[in-house]
Image: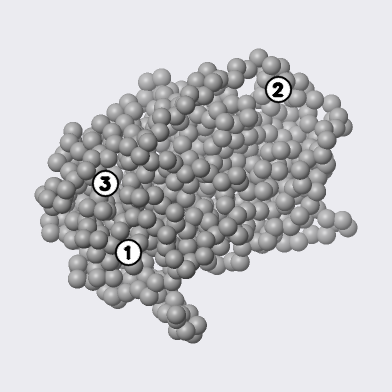
Amino acid sequence: MHEPHAFFSRRWQVLFAGVLLIFAGLARAQSGDGQGTEANDPPTRVARLSFAGGDLGLLPAGSTAWTAADVNRPLTNGDKLSGGPGARAELDLGGAALRINGQSDIGILNLNGQTGQFELTQGTLNLTVRNIDQGSTYEIDTPTLALVINQPGSFRVDVAADGNSTVVSVNDGLAMVYGQNQAQRDVYSGRRYQFNDSSLNDVTVSDITGSDAFDLWCSNLDTQEASQASAQYVSDDVVGGDDLNGWGNWEEDEDYGPVWYPVNVVAGWAPYRFGHWVWIAPWGWTWVDSLPWGFAPYHYGRWAFLHNHWGWIPGPRHARPIYAPALVAFVGAGAGRPVGWFPLGPRDVYSPWYRASHNYYTSVNLANLGAGHDGDQTGLIDRIHNQYGLYQSGRTAAGTSYAYRNTPAALTAVSAQAFANAHDVRGNQVRLDPQQLATAAMMAPTALQRPGGGSFGQPRLIDGRSLPSAGFNRQVVAIGHPATAITTTASTRAGLPTSNVRVLDIRPRPQAISRVQASGGAEATQTSRFTAPTQISPPAAEQPPSRPATLPQIPHFESAQQIKPVEQVPRYQPATRSFAPREENPEQARYEAVQRSHSYVPEQRAQQVNPSYQPYARPDTPRPELQTRFQPETHPQSSPHPHASAPTPAHGEGNQH
């Protein structure tokens, strides 16, 4: 038990050491960045598919075949989602959440550290922005208008089934809409705007006086996310960080600071063992975990075996997080032979298997490594710099020591076919004895298995609905330019349409100060954080409406020198308010009724489950309530056991430098 003053003193020492480490590494990277080109670095941020329900299909960028929309799948520029009747999905963006309703088609046009640009060609989405950095924006592009958001708030967008009108409902916050002929206007909190043409002249403005089941679902999720406790340990911008609550315990470690331990894992569990690999450009091989919490611990930070249990160490709380497809190292005999991997330890340098500049290589390591206990910050930066030279030449670092390289309990291996075709890893695991593990060679990035037709994702389990839907052929208007990867992929891949985005020739003007629509016309300056989502009561009875695989070129990577401390702001506390039923467009309702009467409801095939492993069932709510978190007295992990094959605790890694 630490004394309170000693605890906080040590935490500040670790925090300060992390700041010095990052800036020292950035200076080193900047001085030698001529070895690589930042123009080809991958984005620093992705979206996580955090919830998928109903008939939902995914068309990965660079592919012509629709795949299953698996929870925990990273989504990036060029990916498209199409939902059938009754489908719902949520995309975790780190500091924001985008949710779609049934019969909706969306695509990711440009997602990076400062921009989140999406297209909605038909259907309904909700975007809740909890916090946003200065100069960052979110943009929703529709056939009628472009909605641009640079402040926290909650926004709903509805595009009519025929694509001829767009409804923007501002639940909280302030935004701007843009149309053709230099048209632009502010949209204010508590108001509903129906735009019937792209010039923004034919518009109907009304108060938001109702809600529906989709609003209730979104509001409940906002309330849950506002109450999560991981924010005190993990940056708000870490995608998937909110889902750690209820699935594990946080404990303070003497050497590594806050460590998260998963609970109730099955026998034989180890990091990067329950899930599958997919090919996602521009990173290439990417891990998709099958457990509900399995995103943040596999794409940020490091794993360590502490006190006979696996625990996850997040990156520095104050640094801007940088996404990685999987923080592992590979072993094997080359293409066509079994592929093995193990998690990187707290001191291990991550060498990507995709193209990266020296600046990116340094940043992705420093953003995911803690300050550490040995104080050898200069040695860590030197190792990163030295290993980049080997990485750039396509060679492995001879004699490099990894924390779990020779630990059978940490290594997982599958056949090359299972690896390259998105097969379940646990059900296809290849057992290696200690001698095989000791003789297995570290694999250079060029030796990894090349992708095939089944590498982009697992096949869909639901048949019947024709995909892609016609809505993706509609033109949308935009303010920002889509990522280069979208147009490059469309022009080089047979069967893919050219970009359907028409960028408006318009100069955005500054937005007005955010106002709160309250009685008496009171106005309040918008803070830098979403103040309070609204918890909506269930909708009342229905009332009549009141009125009629080539890697594409990718966006420029944000320079590592821009990594800066993130202001820690207390999470907002949600308020409560009630709504009457949402007003509906009668013509839209009639159209959807006809569509539903002719729609085919497909049968769902039973999923084949490996009898040796039963996947976890999601709780009744999309995320566990905060009060269901386990007490941190014990770690009921059932494996690895502390026997002869267990890894050496990470506390002794100081001799590996």
Residue at (80% x, 35% y) in the render: 583
SS for callout 1 = loop
Numbered disc in front, either 1 or 2: 1
From the image, tell me which residue sits under label 1: 308
How far apart are the alpha carbons under marks 1 and 3?
19 Å
From the image, tell me which residue sits under label 2: 592
From the image, tell me which residue sits under label 3: 412
Q: Earlier in the sequence, mark 1 or mark 2?
A: 1
Q: What x and y, as percent, mark residue 200? A: 72, 34
Q: What x and y, as percent, mark residue 399? A: 12, 59
The quarter holding residue 402 reads bottom left
**How many neighbours does mark 1 have within 10 angstroms: few (below 14), some (14-19), or many (20 or more)?**
some
Q: Amino acid at mark 3?
A: Thr
Numbered disc in front, either 3 or 2: 3
> Please, is residue 495 above or below residue 387 in the view?
above
Residue at (14% x, 41% y) in the render: 333
Q: Please identify the quadrant where the C terminus is shown.
A: bottom left
